[in-house]
């Protein structure tokens, strides 16, 4: 059991001289430089960071999360120069997408030059790199001045953390530090784009959408594994169970009436039912526990993992969630929901 240090950066009033926030970033940087693990907020979800060039530091991430060794990690950097230090070549495609979207919720897959430890890339010849836009992540990266391998800071298989308390619940006693920077913004993991070829290939959908990438480069492709579940995924992590809540999740498309009928049928069998739905849909539905997701897709994305984590075995036996249009960030929302539900869909149309 490790003593996990927690810093609170949510409520610091500005003051002169060195602020407590600066001290926290400095302390966390020293930990990271000495090979320790620190979780920190990014604009997507909380990441669990360690020195990406130090194999034993990176191993601590895998151990803390219980993550399979063949699932590669994303290296996080503060600047384009730092990104260039990790790759064989900055392709014109990567250069274009960096100019358009970095810093931001997008990861560029490029050929590794071997500076990142081999367990970061899970033995692949490529490395995924991201420049986060969150001010705390930026300050931490520029202060410690090393690339940080930083997968989502959750126990492997669970929904990613969008609040410091989610990280604490999963990893307290297993990591060296946690910077609490409040709720994350986007709420879903970054868009992952293979930039090794002539055309960008989306390996994982996220807040930077297919249309935005197409507008920047002129063309875009989607990894076939994102559409057909039968083909071999190019992003290795995609084959693992992900985002799983404590109790089974069923995705239900259709009207509020149809949803209510299914919920009532479950309740008639003695089951306690949880509901994840937009404010609009939820207002006419009775369930044993309800978590509302707002009405706009970006708000649904922000709240989704908090909702999935809220439902415990002690409260409900099954969760129903409505489905969303697979356009814009809706594609990323449905990608995560289908995995969370293990493709358990009650269709209606
Ligand atoms: P996480 O940091 O937990 O959001 O997961 C990182 C994900 O990024 C992995 O599961 C892969 O899907 C993807 N990824 C990271 N590095 C690579 C790479 N070199 N090639 C393809 N996909 C990658
Ligand atoms: Mg993850």
Image (tube, rainbow, N blue to C red):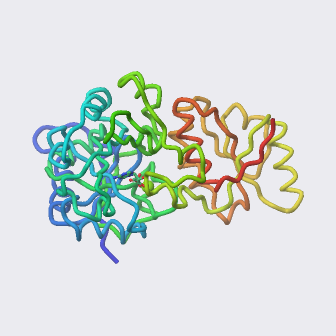
From this view, report whether residue 64 is shown above or below residue 338. Answer: below
From this view, report whether residue 321 is shown above or below residue 28. Answer: above
Residue for point 21% across, 48% down: 140
Residue for point 42% across, 66% down: 67
Residue for point 40% across, 21% down: 215
Q: Where, quadrant-wise, is the N terminus in this rendering? A: bottom left
In this rendering, would 110 be left or right of 269?
left
Residue nearest the viewer, comparing 280 with 16 = 280
Q: Quadrant of ligand 2?
A: bottom left
Residue nearest the viewer, comparing 232 with 63 = 232
Direction front: furthest residue = 198
The percent position of residue 20, horizontal first and vertical second, equals 20, 48
The percent position of residue 251, horizontal first and vertical second, equals 70, 47
Residue nearest the viewer, comparing 324 with 222 = 222
Direction bottom: furthest residue = 1
From this view, report whether residue 53 is shown above or below residue 100. Answer: below
């Amino acid at each position: 059991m490790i003593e996990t240090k927690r810093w609170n950066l949510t409520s610091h009033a500005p003051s002169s001289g060195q602020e407590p926030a600066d001290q926290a970033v400095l302390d966390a940087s020293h930990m990271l430089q000495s090979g320790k693990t620190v979780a920190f907020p990014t604009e997507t979800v909380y990441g669990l960071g360690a020195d990406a060039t130090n194999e034993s530091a990176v191993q601590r991430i895998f151990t803390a999360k219980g993550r399979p060794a063949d699932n590669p990690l994303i290296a996080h950097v503060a600047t384009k120069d730092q990104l260039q230090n990790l790759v064989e070549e900055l392709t014109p495609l990567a250069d274009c997408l960096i100019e358009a979207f970095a810093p931001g919720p997008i990861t560029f897959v490029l050929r590794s030059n071997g500076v990142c430890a081999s367990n970061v890339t899970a033995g692949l010849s490529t490395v995924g790199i991201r420049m986060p836009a969150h001010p705390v992540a930026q300050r931490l990266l520029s202060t410690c001045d090393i690339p940080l391998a930083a997968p989502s800071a959750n126990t492997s298989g669970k929904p990613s953390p969008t609040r410091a308390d989610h990280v604490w619940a999963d990893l307290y006693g297993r990591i060296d530090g946690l910077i609490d920077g409040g709720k994350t913004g986007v709420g879903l993991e970054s868009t992952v784009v293979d930039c090794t070829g002539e055309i960008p290939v989306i390996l994982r959908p996220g807040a930077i959408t297919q249309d935005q990438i197409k507008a920047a480069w002129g063309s875009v492709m989607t990894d076939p594994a994102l559409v057909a579940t039968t083909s071999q995924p190019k992003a290795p992590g995609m084959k693992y169970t992900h985002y799983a809540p404590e109790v089974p999740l069923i995705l239900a498309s259709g009207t509020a009436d149809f949803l209510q009928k299914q919920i009532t049928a479950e309740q008639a069998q003695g089951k306690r039912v949880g509901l994840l739905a937009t404010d609009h849909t939820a207002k006419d539905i009775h369930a044993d526990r309800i978590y509302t997701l707002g009405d706009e897709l970006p708000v649904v994305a922000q709240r989704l993992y908090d909702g999935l984590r809220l439902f415990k075995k002690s409260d409900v036996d099954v969760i129903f969630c409505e489905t969303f249009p697979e356009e814009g960030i809706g594609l990323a929302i449905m990608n995560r929901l289908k995995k969370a539900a293990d493709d358990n869909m009650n269709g209606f149309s």
